[in-house]
Amino acid sequence: MPNSSKASQTRQRIFDACSRILQREGLSNLTLEAVADEADLSKGGLLYHFPNKVALIEALFEYHNNKFEERLQELASQEDSKPGAWLRAYAKASIEQMSNPDNVSLYASLFAAEERYTSAHKLMRNKYVDWQKHVDTCRLDPDWAMLVRFAVDGLWFAEMHRYAPPDQERRNRIVSMILDLTHEKNIPSS
């Protein structure tokens, strides 16, 4: 078991090193050499865990998706059992991520990687398919729930890519409006 624990700790160091490089310098500077240096490993030590850059990028996507998923599940467990609970947790988890400037730059770099690394893009698409299933079954009108998810994702992407994001005060008002939309009583009747 100690070897498994040591391998897990080394992978964590590698992911942390990747995140620092992405936040500081962007995807173009995420090389195997740079990651090995940042993680204080030999290149051979890095290659032991990830045989190539594609494997590293895929694992990094999975790592950050899993962190998001863990936080999402934690927030979902804190919600009541009323309709829209999972969607509220999704909105809150996404908003937490976009509120942290380090996360915004990290995810901007990760999403840039999707264009170059189709396998990473596929991982993200699959994750969204899974999340959409939860959105569709959150006991709100599925079309309404999807519209709310699009509002959350749109705000997230505006922040990530700096596409005319709202200032803090306006973002707070928009976030409040989005969360209000996850309550059944606030859905307009068709």
Image (spheres, grey):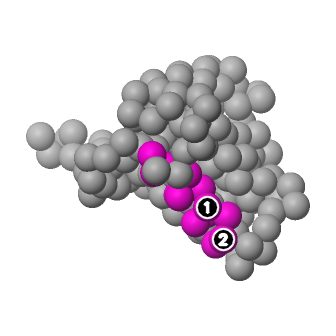
Do we see residue 154 in this rendering? Answer: yes
Residue 112 x/y as whole percent: 76, 40
* Residue plotted at (48% across, 57% down): 92
**What secondary structure is found at the residue carrying circle 2?**
helix
**Quadrant position of the N terminus in the picture:** top left
Residue that lies at the very extreme toward the bottom in this rendered image: 169
* Residue plotted at (39% across, 33% down): 139
As rendered, which of 153 and 117 lies closer to the eye?
Answer: 153
Left/right placement of residue 105 relative to residue 17 reads right
Is residue 120 part of the magenta span, yes or no? no
Residue 141 x/y as whole percent: 50, 31
Do we see residue 108 in this rendering? Answer: no
Q: Which mark is residue 173?
A: 2
**What secondary structure is found at the residue carrying circle 1?**
helix
Is residue 181 part of the magenta span, yes or no? yes
Residue that lies at the very extreme toward the left in this rendered image: 1
The magenta-colored residue range is 172-184
Q: Residues within 10 Å of mark 2 (few under 14, many from 20)?
A: few
Q: Is residue 79 above or below residue 45?
A: below
**Which residue is the site of mark 1?**
177
Q: Is residue 143 above or below residue 1?
A: above
Residue that lies at the very extreme toward the front in this rendered image: 189
Left/right placement of residue 22 relative to residue 16 reads right
Main structural element of the magenta stretch: helix, strand or loop?
Answer: helix
As rendered, which of 64 and 32 lies closer to the eye?
Answer: 64
